[in-house]
Image: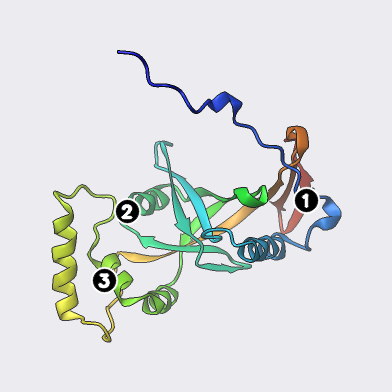
Amino acid sequence: MSEPTRTTHLQDMRRTYERGGLDEADLAGGWLPQLERWLADAVAAGVTEPNAMVLATADAAGAPSARTVLLKGLDDRGLVLYTNLGSRKGREVAANPAVSLVFPWVDLQRQVVVCGTAVPVDAAESDAYFASRPHGSQLGAAVSPQSTVIAARDVLTAARAELERAHPAGTPVPRPDHWGGLRVRPSSVEFWQGRPDRLHDRLRFRADGGAWVVERLAP
């Protein structure tokens, strides 16, 4: 049997990055206003899921894992996401709170890399966000034993139907104790802008004691 024709050659996939540069003079006065600026650019450009970010965690032994989550809060305290705290990421954060986030805005030839420490948000903040979610999302979050092995999808649909009978549309679904927010307190925030010939611009805000310093990294 002959091999299938190769139509994709990974080694030949290249793109020239020429949308612009990033100089120190271009930066806002801190990591937060700079991230807000770039997030607004991603929204304005029509980027799909502009608040999507890759969350990388590691367990107590250092074994890593990563997944895409959504940014749901942003202020000078850090970046907030919500999840089942009994999920793999929740368990790993509890064992090892050092995490990293990546915003992959490929269409803008930009990415942002955040390194920091994840801490739980308070119950009132988690309650407020959970109450703001669509009813179906509340039901799904409440019944899913995230990251655990299940026998079939029917396990989830049956559990959802049962919970929906107890909490039909128009009635609040209580936030489960195992579901809540994580706030990533950054220790560094890197802004990456693609440039020609792979000489990309990388400017990093790094916490240094009680201040933030700006550093340029080689691409």
| Residue nearer the viewer, 115 or 166 | 166
Amino acid at dot 2 = Ser
Give the secondary structure at mark 3: helix
Label of residue 87 in the image? 2
Residue at point 53% right, 58% down?
A: 48
Residue under circle 1? 214
Give the secondary structure at mark 1: strand
From the image, which quarter does the C terminus lie in? top right
CA separation in Å, label 3 and label 2: 17 Å
Quadrant of res 195: top right
| Residue nearer the viewer, 22 or 46 | 46
Amino acid at dot 1 = Val
Residue at point 29% right, 72% down?
A: 136
Extreme residue in the right direction: 25
Give the secondary structure at mark 2: loop
Residue at point 24% right, 60% down?
A: 144
Amino acid at dot 3 = Leu
Extreme residue in the bottom direction: 170
Residue 203, image x and y in percent? 75, 47
Residue under circle 3? 139
Label of residue 59 in the image? none
Q: Is residue 122 above or below residue 4?
A: below
CA separation in Å, label 1 and label 2: 35 Å
Cβ atoms at labels 1 and 3 below 8 Å apart:
no
